[in-house]
Amino acid sequence: MKYELSFIDQIIKAYDVRGLVENYVTPDFVFDVGQAFAMLVKSECIVVGHDMRPSSPELVRAFSEGVNLQGTDVINIGLSSTDQLYFATGRLMMPGAMFTASHNPAPYNGIKMAQAFAKPIGRDSGLNFIRDVLLSGNYANSDKDKKGKVISQDLLVEYAKFLNDLVDCRSIRPLKVVIDAGNGMAGHTAPKIFANLPIEVIPMFFELDGTFPNHEANPIDAANLVDLQASVRSNQADLGLAFDGDADRCFLVDEKGDVVDPSLLSALIAQREIAKHPGANVIYSLISSRIVPEVISANGGTPLRSRVGHSFIKAMMAESGAVFAGEHSGHFYFEEFWGADSGALAALHTLAALGSAKQGTTLSQLLAPYRKYVQSGEINTKVPDIQAVISKIKSHYLNHADLLEIDELDGLMVITEKWWFNLRGSNTEPLLRLNVEGDTGAIMTSIRDEVLELIANLK
């Protein structure tokens, strides 16, 4: 089928395919995406996995039929987390497609695609090719008589063993951990990953349910962590883990029930990875806390700053040979995991660090050395002309008495000795995203309110 540009632009995003199932991500559409994907990767076989959304099995079937029509075989690994799909592309050495809409509400679905060894496929590395094929309607197959086949293969046990071999928690002291799967794919993977470890797991919402009956599987929203916080306190657990819908992101709650800033986890894992790889490069996204590059440098590593977004981080990892990358959104990337992100690996690093610490050490105590600055969290404001507002705010701060640097790697970053802020436009919505960090809560609050007032007056 040939598609209109206005239709395609609603679905093919910068990093994946995503949209409402009823209107956009239909079986007919993903059948054609399957054909185009097979044309792109030119592989004899691809691997496909899917999350727990009600629409996912039918979409996988249609996609696989499209792939098969191009003479390409499909290995269907069934229910999986996104990082399990990345594992499959590495272990099987073939391209892959994961059917998920991550943390989006139930009516959505989508496809995250990768080349072999989890090499990302984004707008400039394949999605534009797929887009052009869909617009042209030309699904060329030189051998129409050759049809591919679908083979089922369960890789869950292999995936769990691989993770446990990378981060060995088998000999740590006993820990009590609450895990909130949010009715997402961590409910499928966590029982295998954390089995046979000295960990008492208290499961929350492990039942796979793509309608998300308890709360959205989006741990970056504090409202979705309330249940986990309460459970950690009531069970007197050592910590809590919260995963998003496709389980590639992980957030922490400490023993007090307080949410842990993802930058603190980035700093912790960076220190552990540099200990294994002295002098290594480590990447951090530019809205991470200043504690992250400080810890990297203090431990003999080289901090590399990246734009926000997994495609930029993964590309920089490949170019620099970095051993680890941390992103403030709860994505953590590992060189030994083909440069891909894994929420489960981040969780295992946390358990290994805490479980190897002195008896009685709490997570809040373990992370205390990294709690040096105060961040605002991301604040979104709807504005009609993002670039115009950013330009005027840049002009406002150009002559600021405390200004050290204005950086435009990703949006506008204004840096002083005691605070910084970043303003970035959303790729998909008319939203201006603000992140602020200060040496103290008072400094952060003052700058946050000052910038928000400027935005309000410029809208």
Image (cartoon, helix red, strand yellow):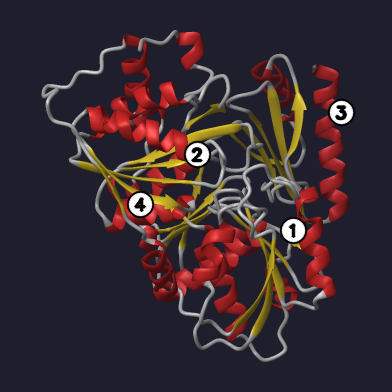
Q: Amino acid at mark 3?
A: Glu
Q: Amino acid at mark 1?
A: Tyr
Q: CA distance from mark 1 to mark 4?
A: 28 Å
Above or below for 376 versus 187: above
Q: Amino acid at mark 2?
A: Ser
- Residue 81 location, x and y as percent? 49, 53
**Foreground: disc 3 or disc 2:** 2
Which of marks 4 and 3 precedes in the sequence? Answer: 4
Q: Residue at x 78, y 70 (%)?
A: 232
Which of marks 2 and 1 precedes in the sequence? Answer: 2
Dot 2 crowding, Cα within 10 Å, few <14, some 14–19, many 20+: many
- Residue 21 location, x and y as percent? 56, 27
Which of marks 2 and 4 precedes in the sequence? Answer: 2
Provide the residue designation for mark 4.
320
**Foreground: disc 4 or disc 2:** 2
Q: Which mark is residue 56?
A: 2
Above or below for 209 versus 178: above
Q: CA distance from mark 3 to mark 4?
A: 40 Å
